[in-house]
Image (cartoon, rainbow, N blue to C red):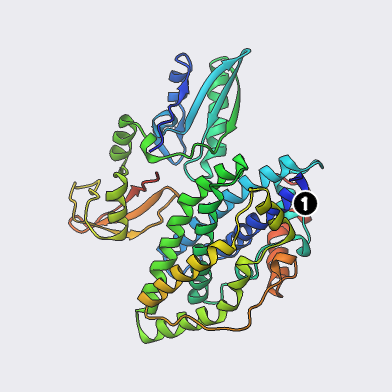
């Protein structure tokens, strides 16, 4: 496959981690307890580390003279192709955990499959990231159980968050043109094959947590096509501020 | 288990032994297992290092420290970050494990015991202060990406546990 398509495929994976990492980073110093604060920011750090590997690879493939920072900080909103789920605001702890849980289970399965890609660099990144993603998945699943099977109030709040965010889960499996091309070349992961397992894994945790799996007929999509929710602009203005204000700045 | 052995030239090893992880100053990067190779090609030292965790902020510092340590010893160096094969806690040497324990960080257990420890099923992590195994996990995520936070039920002190990653 040509480099342009491969870059697009890479961004489709990387942008999810970037935007979710940014969301989690907002909790630095604001987590509900010190341990949770540290955990969320640790997960954020893992995601940013993974993103750097993806963006460095994309920059290397790019014919223009691009760096990882160009991909992270200097694209416009429509050029980011993350799913809507990861850009949803933290709201409260239940929402933050529910978002993480719904993403982690997908992320784990995706990386697991990406290990079989024909692209060696993606395989290396996947192998590295998978170890981290399994910690994330354990963390968020444990919290789902704790909140679901906790008090009446925690159960109510986490159920509400799951119900509300469920409409974004379908998009995780949608395929862009670059995805389809990457799958055909044996480079990309066919997300269709992950869906059944995803729903089963998620259902298993929800059941243990005494929570109901939502039933929905309508799902929301758009992020993968660059059409984002109203929250994305605020997130980007925060994230891009330094690079926009001091172009080319370095640490 | 990953059997990939590090290739470090004998004359460079003592120099690299002097470089430590900035988060764990007692632990040399050689004993931590992050140096995958160090060889001299055409008068330039080429060092390959691999991160413990993808986002480990210490990697940039370690890269710079390697360059300056080698420069002091009269070598020009180039440091590359490699991801494959992925780092594993099995690469921490015996000396490294001892240094961790002495510093107050419980060294990683083997994979199956680690899982039980992190799931709270069994008490297997030894307190670095009093040696008791009557310990419990407070959080899977500790002060750095590679550590979990534990506390001892006997001496009541908190301590870090280096998470197993294989």
Q: Nearer the viewer, residue A29 or B80?
A: B80
Residue at figure coordinates x 63%, y 56% from the top left = A13
A95 versus B11 height, above or below = below
Q: Secondary structure at mark 1?
A: loop
Q: A114 left or right of A212?
A: right
Quickly name the residue at label 1.
A246
Q: Position of residue B150 (x, y in %)?
A: 30, 55
- Examine the rendering and report whether any part of residue A251 can be seen: no
Q: Position of residue B58 (x, y in %)?
A: 51, 41
Which residue appears farthest toward the front when viewing the image?
A184
Examine the image and state in which quarter residue A154 appears.
Answer: bottom left
Which residue appears farthest toward the right when viewing the image?
A64
Residue at figure coordinates x 48%, y 74% from the top left = A93
Q: Nearer the viewer, residue B15 or A164?
A: A164
Q: Position of residue A82 (x, y in %)?
A: 67, 63
Q: B96 left or right of B44?
A: left
Disc 1: host chain: A
Q: Position of residue B20 (x, y in %)?
A: 44, 32
B110 versus B32 height, above or below = below
Q: B57 left or right of B91?
A: right
A26 versus B24 height, above or below = below
Q: How many marks?
A: 1
């Amino acid at each position: 496959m040509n480099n342009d398509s491969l870059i697009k495929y890479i961004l489709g994976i990387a942008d999810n981690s970037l935007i979710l990492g940014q969301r989690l980073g907002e909790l630095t110093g604001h987590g509900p307890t010190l341990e949770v604060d540290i955990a969320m920011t640790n997960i954020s750090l893992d995601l940013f580390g993974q993103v750097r590997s993806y963006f460095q690879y994309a920059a290397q493939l790019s014919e223009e003279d691009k760096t990882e920072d160009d991909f992270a900080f200097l694209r416009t909103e429509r050029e980011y192709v993350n799913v809507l789920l990861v850009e949803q605001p933290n709201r409260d702890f239940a929402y933050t955990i529910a978002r993480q849980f719904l993403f982690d289970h997908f992320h784990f399965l995706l990386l697991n499959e990406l290990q079989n890609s024909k692209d060696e660099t993606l395989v290396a990144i996947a192998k590295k990231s998978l170890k981290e993603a399994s910690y994330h998945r354990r963390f968020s699943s444990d919290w789902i159980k704790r909140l679901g099977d906790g008090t009446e109030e925690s159960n109510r709040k986490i159920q509400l968050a799951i119900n509300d965010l469920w409409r974004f889960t379908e998009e995780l499996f949608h395929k862009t043109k670059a995805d389809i091309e990457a799958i055909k070349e044996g480079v990309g992961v066919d997300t269709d094959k992950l869906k059944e397992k995803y729903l089963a894994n998620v259902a298993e945790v929800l059941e243990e947590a005494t929570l109901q799996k939502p039933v929905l007929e309508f799902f929301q999509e758009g992020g993968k096509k660059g059409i984002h929710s109203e929250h994305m602009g605020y997130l980007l203005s925060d994230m891009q501020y330094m690079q926009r204000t001091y172009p080319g700045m370095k640490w | 288990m990953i059997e990939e052995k590090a290739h470090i030239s004998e004359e460079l090893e003592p120099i690299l032994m002097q470089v430590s992880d900035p988060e764990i100053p007692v632990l040399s990067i050689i004993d931590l297992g992050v140096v995958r190779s160090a060889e001299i090609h055409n008068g330039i030292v080429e060092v390959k290092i691999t991160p413990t965790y993808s986002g480990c902020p210490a990697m940039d510092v370690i890269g710079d420290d390697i360059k300056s340590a080698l420069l002091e010893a009269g070598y020009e160096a180039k440091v590359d970050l490699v991801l494959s094969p992925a780092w594993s806690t099995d690469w921490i040497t015996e000396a490294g494990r001892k240094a961790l324990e002495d510093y107050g960080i419980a060294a990683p257990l083997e994979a199956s015991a680690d899982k039980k420890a992190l799931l709270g099923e069994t008490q297997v992590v030894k307190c670095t202060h009093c040696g008791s195994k009557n310990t419990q996990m407070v959080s899977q995520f500790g002060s750095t990406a590679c550590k979990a936070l534990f506390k001892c039920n006997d001496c009541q002190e908190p301590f870090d546990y280096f998470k197993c990653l294989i």
